[in-house]
Amino acid sequence: MRITCLHTADSNIAVFENAAQELGLNHHEFRHISRPDLLAAAERAGGLTPEILEQTAQVLLALSQDCDRVLLTCSTLGAAAAVAAENTQVPVLRVDQALAEAAMKTAGKVVVLCAVETTLGPTGQLFEQTEKHPDAALEMRLVAGAWGKFKQGDLAGYWQTVAAAADAAFREGAAAVVLAQASMTGAAQFTQRGKPLTSPECGLKAVVAG
């Protein structure tokens, strides 16, 4: 199967390559396209505007012309996947859809951690709209200071900051902790209190199954 991933951070290419290897998906052909400009535009605009949504959907449509699946790995731009999917026969998935579905099956408090402010709205909306366990209680949190470290190229510091926030949530009784953005995945190896859910693992399983 030919799977094309659209990223908005170059560093996420390695994140998804590693996740695919760990899941034993090496027999599939992965192609990675990085468009940091799309996320940068959303950050400047303070969120996902109709123009950026349409631009992202057009990029996804173009990528769908020569592959079997398209996976959008950016949480801020996630809504563009559904727009693109309406105009192509090729499945176009957002990486955090499967993440939300897995998390909201949990009974108890589900804490979703975001590193960048533009992700809070789209991610919160996605999780709210996902079918959930009757006892699931959603809480969205922004990890203060994390995104600044990421933009400075301090990945280790970024992951440590996110891991500390995840451990704090587990300490406070969270039944599930979710790392909303793919770039946060590396933090899972540093947590002490529990294993957070990450989008590359959930998203890649879904794209192969779908």
Image (cartoon, rainbow, N blue to C red):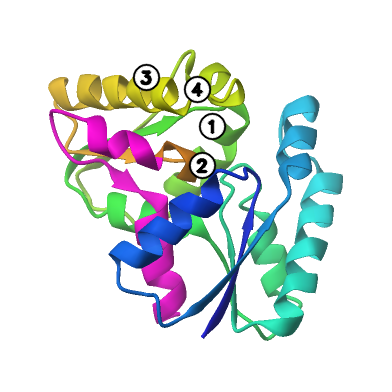
* Secondary structure of the residue carrying numbered label 2: helix
Residue, disc 1: 120
Name the N-terminal-most of marks 3 and 2.
2
From which residue to which does the magenta span run? 185-210
Name the N-terminal-most of marks 4 and 1.
1
Name the N-terminal-most of marks 1 and 3.
1
User: Label 1 neighbourhood size at 10 Å, few (<14), some (14-19), many (20+)?
Assistant: many
* Secondary structure of the residue carrying numbered label 3: helix
In the rendered image, residue 86 lying in the magenta stretch gets the answer: no
Chief SS of the magenta region:
helix
Q: Residue 123 bears which disc, if any?
A: 2
Is there a contact, CB below 8 Å, between mark 4 and mark 2?
no
- The Cα atoms of the two marked residues, 4 and 1, are separated by 22 Å
Name the N-terminal-most of marks 4 and 2.
2
Which residue is painted at 27% across and 27% down in the image? 166
Residue, disc 3: 161
Please give left or right for residue 184 compared with residue 104 in the image.
right
Residue type beneath disc 3 = Thr
Q: Looking at this view, is 5 or 14 the one in front?
A: 14
Residue, disc 4: 154
As drawn, 182 above or below 54: above
